[in-house]
Image: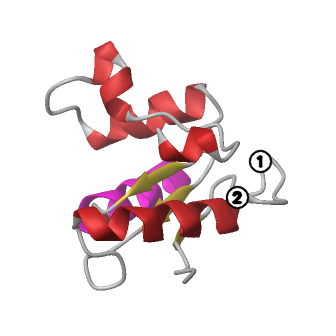
């Protein structure tokens, strides 16, 4: 994985057998929380209400970074853009700095 090659401790949901198929987004966020990971997703319409639901219920998470197709097109050429942007965002941040936060990933050229 490109992020690991840059020293970023990242995994894909596809590497977690319990999350294979079409996992519920709540379960994906809970699994990320269990591993103290920030969830990066393009699924804004489903995740924003889930983040609000977690906050209302007092359920913690370690952050959600959102992307969208306008900023990060879903093309092979855009993969390096997302990798650079995640690396730029993660560099120098404390592990729990995104706790209970949800924001859009800033684009790094």
Image-based side of 36 in relation to 2, left or right: right
Residue 40 place in picture, x, y as percent: 45, 54
10 Å neighbourhood of mark 2: few (<14), some, or many (≥20)? some
Q: Main secondary structure of the magenta part?
A: helix
Q: Nearer the viewer, residue 41 or 74?
A: 74
Badge 1 marks a residue whose secondary structure is loop
Q: Which residue is mark 2?
A: 90
Residue 13 place in picture, x, y as percent: 36, 33
Res. 60 in view: no
Q: Earlier in the sequence, mark 1 or mark 2?
A: 2
| Residue visible at 30% across and 14% down in the picture | 17
Badge 2 marks a residue whose secondary structure is helix
| Residues drawn in magenta | 45-56
Is 107 inside the magenta-drawn segment? no
Res. 23 in view: yes
Image-based side of 78 in relation to 99, left or right: left
Q: Quadrant of residue 48?
A: bottom left
Residue 41 place in picture, x, y as percent: 37, 56
Q: Can you name the residue that lies furthest to the top here? A: 17
Question: Which label was assigned to residue 43?
Answer: none
| Residue visible at 34% across and 70% down in the picture | 78
Q: Is residue 11 above or below residue 92?
A: above
Residue 68 place in picture, x, y as percent: 31, 75
Q: Which residue is mark 1?
A: 96
């Amino acid at each position: 994985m490109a992020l690991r090659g840059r020293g970023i401790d990242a995994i894909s949901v596809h590497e977690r057998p319990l999350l294979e198929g079409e996992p519920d987004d709540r379960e994906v966020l809970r699994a990320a929380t269990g591993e103290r990971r920030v969830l990066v997703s393009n699924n804004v319409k489903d995740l924003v209400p889930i983040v609000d639901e977690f906050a209302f219920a007092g359920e913690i998470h370690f952050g959600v970074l959102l992307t969208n197709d306008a900023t990060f097109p879903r093309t092979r050429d855009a993969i390096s853009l997302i990798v650079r942007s995640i690396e730029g965002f993660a560099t120098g941040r404390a592990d729990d700095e995104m706790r209970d936060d949800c924001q859009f990933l800033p684009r790094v050229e």
